[in-house]
Amino acid sequence: MVVACLATPTTPGYGYALLDTLASAGLAVDANTLYPLLRRLEKQGLLEAQWNTEESRPRKFYRTSPAGTELLEQMLLEWQSLHGSITALRGGTPASPTDH
Amino acid sequence: MATLSERYVAAVCRGVPAAARADVELEVAAAVEDLVAARREDGIEPAAAEREALLELGDPVRLAAGYSGRQLQLIGPGLYPHYIRLLAVLLATIVPVVTIAVLLGTLLSNGDPGETASATVLAALSTTGHVLFWTTAVFALVERGGTTSSPVDWSPEMLRDLPQPGPARLGDTAASIVLQAGTAAYLVWQHFRSPIHDADGHAVPLLDPALWTFWLPYLIVLLLAGAGLEWLRYRARGWTWSFFAANAAIDLAFAVPVIVLAAAGSLFNPAFTSAVDWWPEAGGPLAVIVLVCTAGVTLWDIVDTARKTPRDQRALRELRAGISPARPS
């Protein structure tokens, strides 16, 4: 969940657009989970947020902060080592990050 | 009247700390507007679009909890094992102690059987309520205090010993037989030996001598039958359902007449109770004690054997099948 949130808004995005992007990527997320999560990640400094008042409605735009990018890299590494372990358990050879 | 969206935003804000309220208000309002706009683009009516958008955001209390990081449970998984353990200890100690204290206190102060019984039941219920409420309240406060560390670490030494399944224990059987035969012997003994003597120096029996015509011999026979049943059960290496039925029948055949006699006030010897000068009118309270104890012991014995029977049956089956003694699952 956190990985998905950090991975998506490398370009500025707002809440609903993010919900849409995640859903079309096959990650259905509840709106009532996503909005508080975005705010928490912002408070932790992993996302940067800005109110955009240029459009018809004010919207909060989020983008991944440098600290967020760092955490994302770290979590992706963990993800891949987990994936490797599961693959090895299932009898295959551990997958390297490149052979997807 | 405020629109549903405005009411929704206000409901979420009520559950968020004041410091974050203004910010959350803007965020939630923007989120609602986005969700409504998306549905309007799909050609849904404004009212239906608003309703659906709010349904997607869900219960405002839940959303507010998400924003403020507040728990949605009274006692969380971190404290739950400690909560249950402490509750069990408190209920098993405080409730019986208070109940017995109230029972004795009321008996000694006025001794009215009806009043005593109602005061005792009321004390047991209210003590249980207090223990449940205050323990829960304290744990809920600790939960909200935000301590994440466990107050007491669990260790393997805290594990309770397993009840021994299977073949009847000789100790249990002996204790039970001694108790029943002892009670039968006491019924005879009390007729000849007593702390109270009449003017001629003859012992005044505790129980009404008129009961010797039928009830006392009847009770003695039942007690001996109960002792015999214990021995048979030991020989059969555990409880079976027929032993359970016989035991329950003997229990009830014993308890019902005793309770009826005690309630009717014809259990004790009037000459005995009126002679006890340090406790005037001892007959009533004594009858209540006998009544409560008999009912309690009988009920406990039936419940206890009902629990032991299936366990013993399983253990015996496994023993016969040559499996090593099973652990209760």
Image: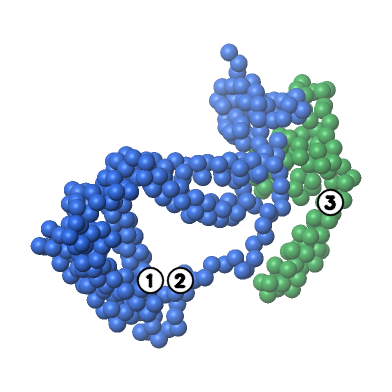
Q: Which tint is chain B? A: blue
* Residue B193 appears in the figure: yes
The residue tagged with tag 3: helix, strand or loop? helix
The residue tagged with tag 2: helix, strand or loop? loop
Closer to viewer: mark 3 or mark 2: 2
| Residue farthest to the left, as pictured | B213
Question: Residue B128: image x %, image y %?
Answer: 46, 45
Name the foreground residue: B311 vs B55: B311
- Pointer 1 local density, CA inside 10 Å: few below 14, some 14–19, many at least 20: many
- Is the Cβ of the residue at disc 1 closer than 8 Å to that at disc 2? yes
Residue B163 circle label = 2
Q: Which tint is chain A? A: green
Name the foreground residue: A67 vs A100: A67
Looking at the image, tell me whether mark 1 or mark 2 is earlier in sequence order: 2
Q: Is B224 on the left or on the right of B328, as rendered?
A: left
Q: Report the chain holding disc 3.
A: A
What residue is drawn where x is 64% and y is 20%?
B6
Q: Is residue B172 above or below residue A22?
A: below
Q: In the image, what residue type sits under mark 1?
A: Arg
Q: Is residue B151 above or below residue B167?
A: above
Q: Report the chain holding disc 1.
A: B
- Pointer 2 local density, CA inside 10 Å: few below 14, some 14–19, many at least 20: few
Q: Marks 1 and 2, how far apart in space? A: 10 Å
